Image (cartoon, rainbow, N blue to C red):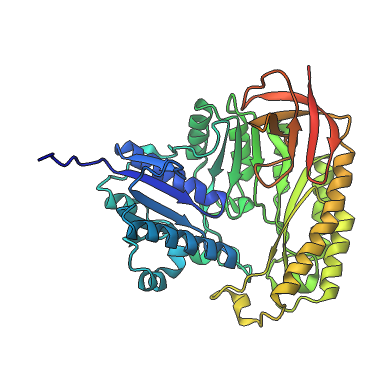
Amino acid sequence: MKAKTLKKDKVNIITLGCSKNLVDSEVLSGQLAANDIDVVHENAKLDHNIVVVNTCGFIDKAKEESINTILDQVELKRRGKLDKVYVTGCLSERYRGDLEAEMPEVDAWFGTLELPLILKQFEADYKAELLGERMLSTPKHYAYLKIAEGCNRTCSFCAIPLMRGKHISRSIEDLVAEAKALVQKGVKEIMLIAQELTYYGLDLYKERALPKLLDALADIEGLAWIRLHYAYPSKFPLEILDVMQRRSNICNYLDMPLQHASNRMLKAMRRNITREEMSELIHQIRAKVPGICIRTTLIAGFPGETEEDVEELKAFLQEHRFDRVGIFSYSHEENTSAYDLEDNVPAEVKAARAQEIMELQQEISYEKNQAKIGQVFKVLIDKKEAGRYLGRTEFDSVEVDNEVVIHSTKKLPIGEFVNVKITKAYDYDLEGEVVV
């Protein structure tokens, strides 16, 4: 009789939602690997026997995607393709009780801050000495750096504080050490992320310490680009811009979600800022850092939004001509303060308004891109696809912004910089050729 061999466990981590979730998955991967457990991200080979689904619970579409992904993995387990299914992340944090009752096939559920408990399922130890050590799931030339957890803001539409808790800053020393380790691995671009960057340091240092952190990171040899994501406009610390202007490796790029431009909507959203104050801030930012790329995010269909509010928002976009804009349809989230309001904008109206705003931004983006024809930009090569190279300028973040399409007969190393002269421009992408 043939002896049965015990196959070693292999863990596949599936990450849904934002870049903050991605970092959490990378940290979990690093801890599992340090405990000699075979671990992969988004495994295409399907040769794993355990799955960890890191979920998103931000808005309806994200929740639906997370639930469908869990159900898919449960079905694989039912068919004998998987031994264990674990679920973590924001959806699990927020709805664990309900989900446990509805999906008893899931072996265990974990919240957003329960990494040591996940590791216990694998009889693995949490290794504190691995602080900042991660198994990157991004290409090796760029990585995200999460500088804080949670959020202290009280925006009426947002459930993030319910899932991630209060704002907790990481120390400058820990972040610099992690960034140095990333650079040693070949990372050239680091994207700073947090639910709210500009709050950084208030809990730890009793002051807004993002400028100090930026200076410390900019000193790291070999770190070519530092990019800022998710800055809150109210009480924006303008000192950030002084550092940006002074340090050549801080990208002239700012991701600052504004959410709306109608004072009525801003008040209802509890954004602690007026349209007039936002306009003044944008003028100050552009005066301090000429040529800066400003990306913003908006919400369509918040309770009580009228056509007049939408027209105000469109006029604001026309006035300020942002480089990049993303938009979400409002999602009515329980336990947020906006949940007490009537969700009275029909889904099809929300979608139509979002489309209307994006069509306006598309025109603005096209005009801005046309102005780039003939200019030369430093471009970071991200990948080769269908016989052409795809890269980004300092004004473009990963996945959400423009790409530069480069046709070259010469081999261009992935993760290296080249100078590219723009020859064609479209709504959201550029084409160019390498120049020496």
Q: Position of residue 20 (x, y in %)?
A: 53, 50
Answer with left or right where residue 20 lies relative to residue 433.
left
Of 2 and 323, nearer the camera is 2
Confirm whether residue 206 shows in the render.
yes
Residue placed farthest to the front in the image?
Answer: 1
Q: Quadrant of the C terminus?
A: top right
Q: Is residue 44 left or right of residue 265?
A: left
Specify whether residue 165 is in view.
Answer: no
Q: Where is residue 109 in the image (x, y as percent from the top left)?
A: 36, 62
Figure quadrant of residue 140 = top right
Quadrant where the N terminus is found in the figure: top left
- For the point 65% across and 47% down, the residue is 229
Tell me the residue at 80%/37% (across/down).
430
* Left or right: 154 as drawn, with respect to 112: right
Nearer the observer, 268 or 12 = 12
Question: Does 216 appear above or below 117?
Answer: above
Q: Is residue 416 above or below residue 118?
A: above
Image quadrant in which you'd find residue 352: bottom right
Residue 409: image x %, image y %? 73, 19
Q: Which residue of the protein is positioned furthest toward the left in this rendering?
A: 1
Residue 292 in picture, x, y percent from top left: 79, 41
Residue at 48%, 30% in the rendered image: 181
Residue at the spot x=79%, y=25% of the render? 433
Toward the viewer: 383 or 375? 383
Question: For the image shown, how many numbered marks are present on the structure?
Answer: 0
